[in-house]
Image (cartoon, helix red, strand yellow):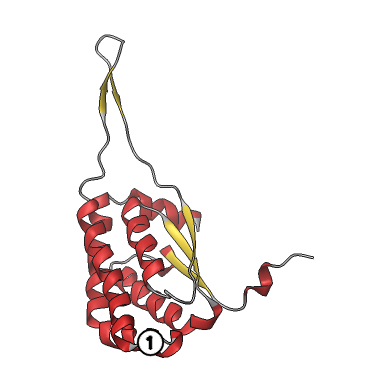
Amino acid sequence: MDAVKADWAALPAPRRGEVVRQIGEALREKKTALGRLVSLEMGKIEPEGLGEVQEYIDIADYATGLSRMLNGKVIPSERANHTMMERWHPLGNIGIISAFNFPAAVYGWNNALALVCGDTMLWKGAPTTNLVSVAVTKIIASVLERNMLPGAICSLITGNENFLIYN
């Protein structure tokens, strides 16, 4: 995962933003089917399922614009002929845990912003909405791979959370 993280973080932020824009477009293309899946698996009425997917699309649009505004400060130095510069670095591997009642939107809010910042992520969706998690991950992976990037930039684990309990 470290090699994937290094390659992804090394891309310029506007290039990462372009990938996020494409993820938003892929979600738009599958909005109806994904919204219905959210409704079916989570129990929301269909307009709420569609609205949840739209929230992910909206944050992808926002993150795309943000990718061109990740700037730092230039700060005067006390030393002659020197300047200090603030530069942002990715956090690295991000863990995202989402609940059953927002199986796509919560991940999307975190995913789109983390991607433009150069982070990789591991998503643990709710065990009662695994189909939504798998569907979203497959959509993202297809966009990443179409851009010659590893789908593992956005990884997923599913199943019951009992594996987290220690004796």
Q: Quadrant of residue 116?
A: bottom left
Q: Visible in this render: residue 30?
A: no
Quadrant housing the C terminus: bottom right
**In the orientation shown, which residue stands out farthest toward the top?**
80
Q: In this view, does 96 lie to the left or right of 17?
A: right
Q: In which quarter of the image is residue 33?
A: bottom left
> Tag 1's secondary structure?
helix
Residue 152: image x %, image y %?
44, 66
**In the orientation shown, which residue stands out farthest toward the right?**
167
Residue closer to the observer: 64 or 102: 102
Residue 73: image x %, image y %?
26, 31
Residue at the image position 31 percent from the left and 10 percent from the top:
79
Image height of 121 relative to 26, above or below: above
Residue at the image position 22 percent from the left and 63 percent from the top:
61
Q: How crowded is mark 1: few (under 14 residues within 10 Å), some or many (20 or more)?
A: some
Residue at the image position 39 percent from the left and 74 percent from the top:
104
Residue 30: image x %, image y %?
27, 83
Q: Is residue 140 left or right of residue 134?
A: left
Image height of 28 relative to 33, above or below: above
Residue that label 1 marks? 39
Residue 71: image x %, image y %?
25, 39
Q: Visible in this render: residue 137?
A: yes
Q: Quadrant of residue 45?
A: bottom left
Task: Give the mark count.
Answer: 1
Residue at the image position 34 percent from the left and 49 percent from the top:
10
Kind of residue sitting beneath label 1: Ser
